[in-house]
Amino acid sequence: MAERGPVKATVVGSSPTPGAPTSGGAMKLYICYGLFPSPRPGGHPCKNAAVAVREAGYDPEIVKSYGLGIFPGALNMTKGRREIKKLTGNYWAPVLVTDDGTVVQGSHEIADWAREHPAGAGASDAAAPAQA
């Protein structure tokens, strides 16, 4: 088995759990039950996070994480909630894991991250011809 490199974890809006598996790879968005409309003021946090990430040009893998953040661990035994706990130290969704392993928790924080990191921004800058 090949050795893995060091883990890169920048957790925004939460305290990281030492040793959390954030080695990078495909972008993932951990949500609660779904991306449905909500009557709550401001909309549902998981849907808001998903819309912000998609509007920024990304298409993350959606990981449904059944349970509820306020519940103790014994009631949050689904794979998604256990992964959220490893990544952030708590069970609250939404959580975004970017391609480079950065972990962002909370719908407002994810929306801020998405606005600050639109897809292709670095690639278009690099492809622009140098001006004399």
Image (cartoon, rainbow, N blue to C red):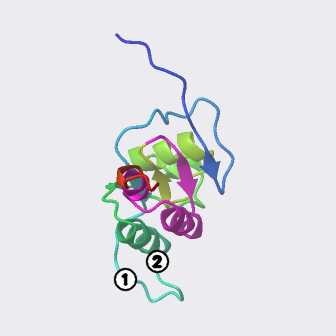
- Tell me which label, 2 or 1, sits earlier in the chain: 1
From the top left corner, tell me how far across and down residue 61 is, in percent: 31, 53
- Residue found at x 35% / y 67%: 54
Asked where in the image residue 120 lies, by quadrant, the reply is: bottom left
In the rendered image, which residue does mark 2 sit on?
44
Q: CB under 8 Å between callouts 2 and 1?
A: yes
From the top left corner, tell me how far across and down residue 84 is, in percent: 51, 48
* Bounds of the magenta segment: 100-125
Q: In this view, does 67 lie above or below 4?
A: below
Q: Which residue of the protein is positioned furthest toward the front in this rendering? A: 132
Q: Is residue 66 visible?
A: no
Element under disc 2: loop
Amino acid type, callout 2: His
Q: In this view, does 84 lie above or below 62?
A: above
In the rendered image, which residue does mark 1 sit on?
37
Pick the front one: 31 or 59: 59
